Image (spheres, rainbow, N blue to C red):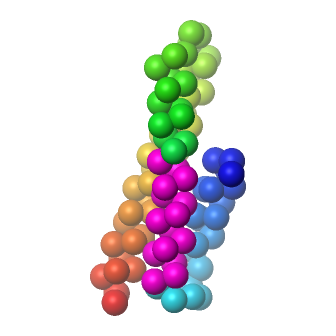
Amino acid sequence: MSTKEIIKKLEFILGTKNGVAAKRVEDIEVLLAELGKKKIKFQAKLDGATTSKDSIKAERKLAVCNAQIDKGRAAIEELLGDN
């Protein structure tokens, strides 16, 4: 699954009002696991970057992953707090 697809699904789950909180938490956790894998991949690319262009690109993707992971964790805390 591409990073864009993961982020798109995460944004959809975070934005929807329908569904059971437990299912949403489960879905978010799956996507967070995928983002965790992507984060490791982008960190490796950043560590091995040979040009500033590659470095900047990897830093940007890593920052997006970190931001989405933080959003997902906050959403899980909020959903679990509602129950």
Regarding residue 46, the answer to whether it shows in the image is yes
- In this view, 35 is above or below 60: below
The one nearer the camera, 43 or 59, is 43
Residue 70: give x, y in percent of width and height: 40, 56
Q: Measuring 69% from the left and 47% from the top, which residue is drawn there?
A: 2
- In this view, 58 is above or below 30: above
Q: Measuring 48% from the left and 58% from the top, which residue is drawn there?
A: 32
Residue 54: give x, y in percent of width and height: 60, 19
- In this view, 29 is above or below 57: below
Regarding residue 14, the answer to whether it shows in the image is no
Residue 76: give x, y in percent of width and height: 39, 71
- In this view, 58 is above or below 68: above
In the rendered image, residue 24 lying in the magenta stretch gets the answer yes
In magenta, the rendered stretch is 22-36
Main secondary-structure element of the magenta-colored stretch: helix
Q: Measuring 30% from the left and 82% from the top, which residue is drawn there?
A: 81
Residue 12: give x, y in percent of width and height: 63, 70
Whether residue 73 sits left or right of residue 23 in the image: it is left
Q: Quadrant of the C terminus?
A: bottom left
